[in-house]
Image: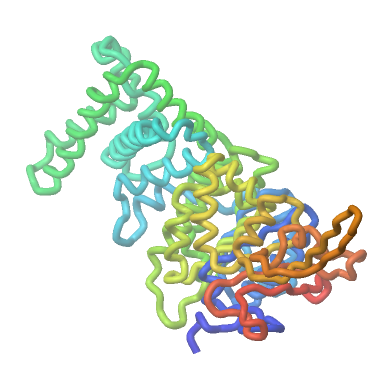
Amino acid sequence: MSVLDMPLIEWPIGYPFTVRDACEGVLIMGGLGSGKTSGSGALLAKQFLTKGFGGLVLTAKEDELDLWKSRCEKYNRLDDLIIIGHNSDHYFNFLDYESSRPDIGTGITHNIADTLKTVIKAGANDGQESDKAFWDNALQQLLVNAVDLALLTQKKIRFEHIYKIVQSAPKSKNELSSETWRKSSQCFQCMQHAAKALNHSTKTEKTDELARRLHIIEDFFLGNWLYLSEKTRSIVEQMFFGFGDRFMRDPLYSLFNTTTTVTPEDTIRGKIIIINLPYLIYENTGRDGQVLFKYIWQRAMQRRKIKDNSRPTFLWVDEAHYFIHDHDIDHQSTARSYRACTVYLTQNLPNYTLHAGGGDKGNYSFKALAGNLGTKFFHANSDVETNEYAADLIGKELKWVGSEGMSMGENSSFSEGSSQSLLHTIEPSEFARQKTGGQLNNYEVQVVVHRQGIPFHVTGRNYALLTINQRTI
């Protein structure tokens, strides 16, 4: 039997939930106190841990570390637990990793720049869609040239090298002609150092490539960048420094800019990495560090060479709306091929759309991502939009609806009858009445599960109302 066909959950009324289903992605939605963490979330976490999956866990709340510690202890996985966070003993120099890992694509300037841009944009407001392409392109150009200059001049690249290059880039012709500025500008010194090294090198195909790269960098910093309007250049700089300042200070500096004791590939070997920088404690700093590792992890999973016995891995993100980025949809569209199981937990649809940019952009972003998450758990919820989404997803059917009428007058009459109408199979209001666990509900959590593909065989439908007992997990 293929690893993908290994059962994880034996549904009481249908075909089992398998590794294949998990690799197609899971979305868990439920209001506060609905039991999504202690119900369906706990059920999935138990299966991932007992079956030996490796995984990455992001944290939004302070108590999530203790929750996962207790889960790992309960299922004998404490030895596999790796914690990256304040006062931890583990570190990840992401730029050194991206520029020196032994595989195809290592050190490609645009890939490294794209990593930085992804994190920057995850916490930025895109503004007007008509301006988005311009600012994206301007930021991309700055990052690509700063990264490439650091790669040309540093044996071991660190974020502070890129930061100082951007910080000291020329802003006027007067600076360029100032000897004091030339000596103090790391940007200028790096270009000068690279040029001198090339002048003293024997001409080869490799040095021709390096000279070509340096020429492009010089054209940018001494041309395009220098001649941008002051306002445009200032906005692009602030996009970078708003993110960069957080990585130049602890805890992010120590965790992601010094040495490396853990890499995303450790999850392939069965480790469970928890990024303990809870968003609700560290706010933007916590988000940036976690989105960074998440994106690099997603790309690492996409580089995997899958064999018949390859270990599945999982990405676990509670309060997932805090940690979304532009490439989530792309990753999820191919995750099954790399045995990467995504589990996103969030309270409601508006939370996601708001953090994805709001309006039509946020709605389309949610629908695109949710469409690539094959199994959805809908817990009790009081949000109308979320309940309508769930009801629409499950669909409609013809139902008999009774009607009656009465007319008053000299000859009063009463009539009754019925007719068929196309109505939601599960009305949106029903989701608000599901059991939420705890002693009041005899520890029972009710959840509507919607799955793509194979139906629940008893009903022949692709949804079912299930009950999870919190005391049995």
Q: Front-most of 27 and 434?
A: 434
Residue in view at x 82 percent, y 63 percent: 404
Residue 141 sits in which quadrant? top left
**Residue 126 percent location from the top left of the image:** 47, 35
Residue in view at x 27 percent, y 26 percent: 221
Q: Front-most of 143 and 139?
A: 139
Q: Is residue 321 left or right of residue 183?
A: right
Quadrant containing the C terminus is: bottom right
Q: Is residue 76 left or right of residue 177?
A: right
- Vertical side of 373 occupied by 281: above or below: above
Q: How is the image coloured?
A: rainbow
**Residue 240 percent location from the top left of the image:** 44, 31
Residue in view at x 41 percent, y 21 percent: 234
- Vertical side of 232 occupied by 12: above or below: below
Q: Is residue 45 left or right of residue 126?
A: right
Q: Is residue 239 visible?
A: yes
**Residue 155 percent location from the top left of the image:** 32, 44
Q: Residue furthest bottom?
A: 1
Total number of numbered discs in the rendering: 0
Q: Is residue 418 left or right of residue 159?
A: right
Q: Residue furthest front?
A: 410
Q: Is residue 162 visible?
A: no
Q: Front-most of 39 and 196?
A: 39
- Vertical side of 304 occupied by 133: above or below: above
**Residue 258 percent location from the top left of the image:** 48, 44
Residue in view at x 38 percent, y 72 percent: 305
